[in-house]
């Protein structure tokens, strides 16, 4: 019998279990995601489903400049706490090490970090290798 994976923390060793259950919440169709990207962020691009067990996650490759983003859709019910915790974690990491590259939410054309659509909270974190979109979206106004 295989031994369960273990993780080491400050408190000692804890058992780690993984679930392979795919995300089963409301989902954005590729057409809806494409429209959302264009309307909210002014981005058109190719979408690739990345798969997830908790959220709907798609890689976005911007047609205009090749930048890469991650479109992340979470169930609106109960996800506000998770989104807030992620934002706090990013700010904490940056305060500890300003040189650390961590994803951050790309603001919409209306300067929002989060969009509510069809029972989902949707955001667009930029991948660490992508330059900030805020400057380029403001220049086009």
Image (tube, rainbow, N blue to C red):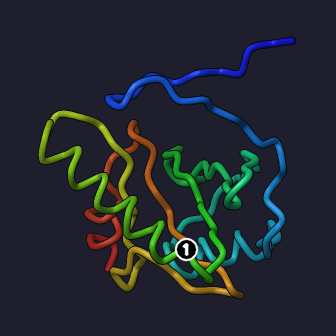
Residue 135 rendering spot, x and y as whole percentages? 26, 63
Residue 12 rendering spot, x and y as whole percentages? 40, 25
Quick check: 91 above or below 112? above
Which residue lies under the disc numbered 1?
79
Relative to 62, 130 lies left or right: left
Residue 78 rendering spot, x and y as whole percentages? 57, 78
User: Under tag 1, what secondary structure?
Assistant: helix
Residue 63 rendering spot, x and y as whole percentages? 60, 53
Q: Say which of 123 and 139 sits in front.
A: 123
Q: Quadrant of the rendered structure where residue 76 is? A: bottom right
Quick check: 70 above or below 30? above
Relative to 118, 102 lies left or right: left
Mark 1 surroundings within 10 Å by alpha-carbon count, few (fewer than 14), some (14 through 19), many (20 or more) = some
The residue shown at (76%, 76%) is: 32
Relative to 5, 128 lies left or right: left
Q: Say which of 5 and 35 sits in front.
A: 5
The residue shown at (51%, 24%) is: 7
The residue shown at (52%, 51%) is: 69
Q: Quadrant of the rendered structure where residue 15 is? A: top right
Q: Work out which quarter of the rendered image holds the C terminus and state it.
A: bottom left
Quick check: 121 above or below 100? below
Q: Work out which quarter of the rendered image holds the N terminus and state it.
A: top right
Relative to 23, 104 lies left or right: left
The residue shown at (36%, 55%) is: 104
Q: Quadrant of the rendered structure where residue 102 is? A: top left
């Amino acid at each position: 019998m295989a031994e369960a994976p273990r993780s080491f923390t400050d408190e000692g060793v804890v058992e780690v279990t993984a679930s392979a259950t795919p995300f089963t919440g409301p989902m954005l169709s590729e057409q809806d995601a494409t429209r959302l990207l264009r309307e909210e962020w002014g981005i058109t691009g190719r979408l690739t489903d990345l798969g997830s067990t908790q959220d709907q996650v798609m890689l976005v490759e911007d047609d205009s400049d090749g930048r890469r983003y991650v479109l992340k859709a979470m169930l609106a019910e109960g996800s506000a706490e998770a989104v807030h915790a992620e934002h706090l974690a990013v700010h904490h990491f940056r305060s500890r090490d300003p040189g650390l590259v961590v994803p951050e939410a790309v603001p919409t054309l209306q300067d929002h970090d989060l969009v509510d659509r069809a029972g989902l909270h949707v955001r667009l974190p930029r991948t660490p290798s992508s330059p900030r979109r805020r400057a380029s979206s403001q220049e086009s106004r």
